[in-house]
C-alpha cells in the first residue's frame, strides 16, 4: 500500500474541509446561549488566553542555535497571529543558556504590536535590570515544587530561590513591571518522582503573595494525567484565585491536551468559596475553569530529561481543540501554522504539531 | 455543597458544571486492540505472517482482553490481510481473550468461520459518500449486506461488533450530523451487533463534537454497548477519549505503537497509541488489566520489524532515558 490511494484524490483538501467547518481559521464565535445547551460541555471558560512560549521555552530546548534574525522573524509572525502574550527571550547568563545569548538584541529589534505583551525570563536581579535596560515591560520568574529540581536547575533550594525572586518582584513593583511566576515539576519531578499537590500549592502561594500576577503550573516532564492534574489544581485553588492560574503542559507522554481539557473544566466552586463575602455574582463570569494555557508553536522544544522525547504542547493543536469547543482565543490558527512552518524550515526539523502534520501533508 | 448553597443562594443560578468536575469515570475500561488489523492494514510495508502471529501473541500476554486479529477481505483490495486464515489459525488463543476478525460480507464471514473465528466485526459508516468510495454502495445497501452476515452469525452463535466510521467528520462530505450517526448506530445495534464502535476516521473531532455526537447516539443505543475509536491525526484523540469516558463510555479502541497512518492525509498519524491510552487510564486510576511494560515491548518489536518510529509518545519518552 505504498501508493496514495485513489480515494485521496477525490477528498476535499484539508484546508477546504477545515476552513469550511470552522474547525480552524478564524477564531470561533462564542456559542449562542440557545444553541442546544445539553451539547455544550458545561463549566468551560468562554475565552482562553494562550501564552506562546515557543521563542523562549521552545527554542531554548532546541539543539541548533538559532540566528537572531530568525528568532525576530518568528516573534514578528506570531505577533500577527493574534496571540496576546509571546514570551520573547530570557535574560540568563549566556554561559548557561547560549541559545538566549542574544536576548538584548532580540528584545530591541522585535516589532512591538499594540495589545501584545512580550514577557522575558529574569532569574535574578541582574537579569531583571538587563531586561529593563533592553526595553522589557514584563518579566517572569521560575520556581519549582521540587527541592532536587531547584538544586539541579538553579543550584539553590526552593527557599533561596524565593528570596532571589523577591528581589526581582520588589524592583518590578517599584517600576510597575508585572511579574509572572512559573512553578516547575507541578505533576512530577525527574529526580524526586511524585510531587505532592500541597507542595505545589505552597510554592505557588509564595510566588503569588510576593506579587506575581499569574502562576503558570508546569508539568515539566509531561508525566501528569487528568487525575493528577485535577488533584494538583484543587490543592492550588485553595490558595490562589482560579483567574490567576495558568497550565503549562508538556506532551512528553501524549497527555497534554487531555490535561489541558481537564484544567479548563476544573470545578470552580471550590475557588468561589475562598472569596470574601459578600460579592457580586458577576464575578462568576470568569470562574469556570483555568483560563490561561501555555503552549509553543510547532511544539518547539524537546524534553531535556528524556532524549528524543517531545516537550511543549503545540500551540496549533491546543487552538484546534479550543476552537472545536467553541472557546474564543483570538488567535488565527492558519497564521500560527505558517509561523510554525517557517521556524521548522529554518531549523530543518519536522513539526511536533499534529494539526500541522495533517494539514501540510496533502 | 448543600451548606454552600444555603450560604450563597446565587450558587443555584450557576451554569451546571459537567460531571467531569465530579470526577465520575468508569472504574474499568475494556481496551480493544486494533493494531494487528486496523494498524497493519494501513502500514506501507507488507508484514510477514509469522511477524503478525508473534505480534498478536505478544499482545495476548499483556492482558488485553480483545485483539482484532485480521480481516477476511479479498486480498485484491487489502493485500496486507491476504494471510488471514493462516494468521487466525497460527496465533495462540489465550483463555479470556477475544480475537475478532473483520468480515465485510457473507463470503468473508464463511471463510472466517471455517478458519476458526469466534467473533466478527462489520464496518458501517455515517457518510453516504464515504460508503460509496470505500465499499461502492450506499449505506442502506451496506446494511443489507450486513444483515446477511448477522443472520449467519446468529445461526452460529457468533457475536458481531459493529463499527461506524466518520462519526465526527468525513473526508468527502465534511461535517456529519450526529443524528445520522445515531441512526446508523441504532440500525446496526438493532440488527444484533453487541457493541458499536464509533470511529473518528479522520481524527478531526474535538471534545465538543465528541460530546454532541455521543449525546445523540446515547439516545438510541445503550451506553454499555458503545465504544469510541479515536484517531490522533489532529492530536485530539486522548482529549476526545477523555470526554467519552466522562460521559460513561467504557470501551476504547487503540493500536499498539499507534500503528496505521491515515490514508487521507499523507504522512499524518492515524490510530491513537494503546500505550498512551493505557498511561492516561492508569493515571486516572481506571483498571484496564493491561501490563504497560509488556505492551511497550510489543510496540518496540513491531516497530523494529516495520523499520519505523513508534507513534506512541509514552514509548518515545521511555525507551531512550
Image: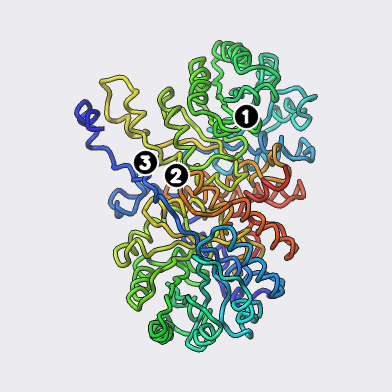
Q: What residue is rendered at 38% in x and 82% in y?
A: B154
In this rendering, the label closer to the viewer, 1 or 3? 1
Q: Which mark is residue B109?
A: none
Chain identifier of the residue bearing label 3 in the image: B
Badges 1 and 3, same chain: no
Q: What residue is rendered at 42% in x and 30% in y?
A: A242
Q: Position of residue A316 (x, y in %)?
A: 57, 48
Q: What residue is rendered at 44% in x and 44% in y?
A: A328
Regarding residue A265, the answer to whether it shows in the image is yes
Left/right of residue A44 with respect to residue B201 in the rendered view: left
Regarding residue B201, the answer to whether it shows in the image is no
Q: Secondary structure at mark 1?
A: loop
Residue on which disc 2 sits: A328
Q: Quadrant of the N terminus of chain B?
A: top left
Q: Secondary structure at mark 2?
A: loop
Badges 2 and 3, same chain: no
Residue on which disc 3 sits: B21
Residue situated in front as seen by the camera: A99 or A272: A272
Separation (CA) of disc 1 from disc 3: 29 Å
Q: Which mark is residue A192?
A: 1
Residue situated in front as seen by the camera: B191 or B16: B191
In this rendering, the label closer to the viewer, 2 or 3? 3
Q: Secondary structure at mark 3?
A: helix
Separation (CA) of disc 2 from disc 1: 38 Å
Amino acid at each position: 500500500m505504498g501508493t496514495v490511494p485513489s480515494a485521496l484524490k477525490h477528498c476535499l483538501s484539508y484546508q477546504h474541509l477545515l476552513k469550511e467547518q470552522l474547525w480552524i481559521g478564524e477564531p470561533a464565535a462564542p456559542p449562542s446561549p440557545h444553541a442546544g445547551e445539553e451539547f455544550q460541555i458545561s463549566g468551560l471558560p468562554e475565552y482562553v488566553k494562550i501564552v506562546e512560549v515557543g521563542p523562549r521555552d521552545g527554542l531554548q530546548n532546541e539543539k541548533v542555535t538559532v540566528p537572531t534574525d530568525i528568532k525576530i522573524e518568528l516573534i514578528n509572525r506570531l505577533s500577527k497571529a493574534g496571540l496576546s502574550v509571546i514570551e520573547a527571550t530570557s535574560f540568563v547568563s549566556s554561559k548557561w543558556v547560549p541559545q538566549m545569548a542574544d536576548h538584548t538584541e532580540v528584545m530591541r529589534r522585535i516589532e512591538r504590536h499594540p495589545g501584545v505583551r512580550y514577557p522575558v525570563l529574569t532569574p535574578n536581579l541582574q537579569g531583571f535590570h538587563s531586561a529593563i535596560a533592553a526595553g522589557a515591560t514584563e518579566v517572569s520568574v521560575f520556581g519549582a515544587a521540587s527541592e532536587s529540581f531547584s538544586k539541579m536547575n538553579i543550584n539553590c533550594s526552593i527557599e533561596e530561590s524565593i528570596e532571589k525572586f523577591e528581589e526581582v518582584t520588589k524592583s518590578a513593583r517599584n517600576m510597575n513591571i508585572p511579574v509572572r511566576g512559573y512553578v516547575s515539576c507541578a505533576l512530577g519531578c525527574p529526580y524526586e518522582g511524585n510531587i505532592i499537590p500541597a507542595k505545589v500549592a505552597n510554592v505557588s502561594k509564595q510566588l503569588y503573595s510576593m506579587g506575581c500576577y499569574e502562576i503558570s503550573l508546569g508539568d515539566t516532564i509531561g508525566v501528569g494525567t487528568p487525575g493528577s492534574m485535577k488533584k494538583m489544581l484543587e490543592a492550588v485553588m485553595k490558595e490562589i484565585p482560579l483567574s490567576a492560574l495558568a497550565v503549562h503542559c508538556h506532551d512528553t507522554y501524549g497527555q497534554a491536551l487531555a490535561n489541558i481539557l481537564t484544567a479548563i473544566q476544573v470545578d470552580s466552586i471550590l475557588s468561589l468559596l475562598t472569596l470574601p463575602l459578600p460579592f457580586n455574582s458577576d464575578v462568576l463570569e470568569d470562574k469556570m475553569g483555568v483560563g490561561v494555557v501555555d503552549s509553543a508553536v510547532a511544539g518547539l522544544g524537546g524534553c531535556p530529561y528524556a532524549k528524543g522525547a517531545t516537550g511543549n504542547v503545540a500551540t496549533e493543536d491546543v487552538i484546534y481543540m479550543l476552537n472545536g469547543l467553541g472557546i474564543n482565543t483570538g488567535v488565527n490558527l492558519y497564521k500560527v501554522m505558517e509561523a510554525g512552518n517557517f521556524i521548522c524550515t529554518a531549523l530543518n526539523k519536522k513539526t511536533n504539531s499534529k494539526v500541522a502534520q495533517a494539514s501540510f501533508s496533502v | 455543597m448543600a451548606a454552600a448553597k444555603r450560604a450563597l443562594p446565587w450558587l443555584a443560578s450557576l451554569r451546571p458544571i459537567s460531571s467531569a468536575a465530579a470526577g465520575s469515570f468508569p472504574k474499568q475500561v475494556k481496551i480493544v486492540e486494533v493494531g494487528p488489523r486496523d494498524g497493519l492494514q494501513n502500514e506501507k510495508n507488507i508484514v510477514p505472517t509469522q511477524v503478525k502471529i508473534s505480534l498478536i501473541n505478544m499482545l495476548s500476554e499483556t492482558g488485553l482482553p480483545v485483539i482484532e486479529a485480521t480481516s477476511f477481505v479479498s486480498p485484491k483490495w487489502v493485500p496486507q490481510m491476504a494471510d488471514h486464515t493462516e494468521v487466525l489459525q497460527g496465533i495462540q488463543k489465550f483463555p479470556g481473550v477475544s480475537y475478532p476478525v473483520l468480515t465485510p460480507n457473507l463470503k468473508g464471514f464463511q471463510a472466517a468461520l471455517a478458519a476458526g473465528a469466534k467473533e466478527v466485526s462489520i464496518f458501517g459508516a455515517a457518510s453516504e459518500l464515504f460508503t460509496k468510495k470505500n465499499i461502492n454502495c450506499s449505506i442502506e445497501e451496506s446494511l443489507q449486506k450486513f444483515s446477511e452476515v448477522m443472520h449467519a452469525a446468529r445461526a452460529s452463535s457468533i457475536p458481531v461488533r459493529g463499527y461506524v466510521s466518520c462519526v465526527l467528520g468525513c473526508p468527502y462530505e465534511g461535517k456529519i450530523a450526529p443524528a445520522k450517526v445515531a441512526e446508523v448506530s441504532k440500525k446496526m445495534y438493532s440488527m444484533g451487533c453487541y457493541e458499536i464502535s464509533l470511529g473518528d476516521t479522520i481524527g478531526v473531532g474535538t471534545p465538543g463534537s465528541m460530546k454532541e455526537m455521543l449525546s445523540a447516539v446515547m439516545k438510541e443505543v445503550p451506553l454499555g454497548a458503545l465504544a469510541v475509536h479515536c484517531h490522533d491525526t489532529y492530536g485530539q484523540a486522548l482529549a476526545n477519549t477523555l470526554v467519552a469516558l466522562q460521559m460513561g463510555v467504557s470501551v476504547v479502541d487503540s493500536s499498539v505503537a499507534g500503528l496505521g497512518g491515515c490514508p487521507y492525509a499523507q504522512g499524518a498519524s492515524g490510530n491513537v497509541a494503546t500505550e498512551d491510552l493505557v498511561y492516561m487510564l492508569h493515571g486516572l486510576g481506571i483498571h484496564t488489566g493491561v501490563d504497560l511494560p509488556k505492551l511497550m515491548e510489543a510496540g518496540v518489536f513491531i516497530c523494529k520489524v516495520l523499520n519505523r518510529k513508534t507513534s506512541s509518545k509514552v514509548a518515545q519518552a521511555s525507551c531512550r532515558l
